Amino acid sequence: MKPRNLSNLMTQMSVTAILAVGMLMVIVSGNIDLSVGSVLGFAGGIAAFSLTTLEYGVPVSILLAVAVGTAIGVFHGSLTAYLNIPAFIVTLGGLLAWRGAVKWLLGGTTIPISTDSFKMIGQGNLPLNYGWLLAAAAILFVLFMAYQSARAVKEYGLGEANYKGELIKSIIPVGGIVIFIWVMNSYQGVPIPVLILLAVALFGAFLMNSTTFGRYLYAIGGNADAARLSGINNKLNVLKVYALLGALTGIASLIFTARVGSASPDAGTLKELDAIAACVIGGASLVGGRGTIFGACLGALIMASLDNGMSLLNVKDYMQDIIKGSILVAAVGLDMMNRKQG
């Protein structure tokens, strides 16, 4: 694959992957959100309306989109957690309501965006030198984590610190970082959407693997009653995870709107299904308690590659939908079979 094609593929997957990071957290907690596509369209419409009609400027418009997404997430989470309305019903209603809201906001028409600084969010690239600085920072982070891993073995009395072994394990990720930056710089540099995705994915991985909040989500999704009896505030954590998904949906809406250079009434349609499919293909269980951020991002890459490949092969739109739907059903079916065997 040529650097240009790979760069376009990574940019294309960034919106789905960011949604998948938030969706993964919700799914791990044993819930679902069918409204993210409509919320993406509405938050993007808010940003475009703020820029073009209200003329509030780029920073305020960005904050408004993220704030609106977060507020909607809090609303959905409150209905689910505190009123005990099933998440499926709450977010299915949200899918319809927020799609209607964006149609009302935009008056049923498309609003073009001419602000170059805003469009950079979805169309810009890092300067080549900054790409290598990013690579250096990422490599230092990998080496630091390897050092910490070796040190932890000694501190917890599990044996001697094997710094050499951890260093050898770091060769593959370090090599991957160098190759990735080299390929991106061979075209126009690291796309800004990909940079945002990397930041979101690292944040999500840290949250799920290294914080009590992440452990609580796995516990709630694994067995909500046991989690509650152990002292976990299930309702508050469900509210938090929906708020987080809302904020990430707001961020994704900025990339999507900036990339296409406009806000339209149908923006984000079916994006919720892409995000859910990415999570399931990446190994998440729809009944909760299992899934990883890396798996969700890998699933988003697979979905984007599938879309790209079918487009290059001129596969009809209806057949693309049939294929993606079949893959989603097959992935869920395999997960259920594995759970029964386990």
Image (spheres, rainbow, N blue to C red):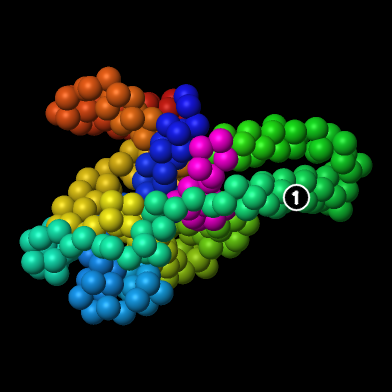
**Is 30 or 128 nearer to us in this picture?**
128
The residue under label 1 is 140
Q: Residue at x 31, y 79 (%)?
A: 56
Q: Magenta part of the protein: which range? A: 185-202
**Disc 1 on helix, strand or loop?**
helix
Q: Is residue 195 magenta?
A: yes
- Quarter location, residue 246: bottom left
The image quadrant that residue 327 belongs to is top left
Task: Between residue 91 and residue 202, name the one nearer to us.
Answer: 202
User: Whole-percent x and y of residue 108?
Assistant: 8, 61
Whether 216 is drawn above or below 323: the answer is below
Q: Would you say 247 lies left or right of 150 here? A: left
Hey, what amino acid is under mark 1? Answer: Leu
Residue 144 falls inside the magenta stretch = no
Residue 139 screen position, x and y as percent: 72, 46
- Residue 134, above or below 309: below
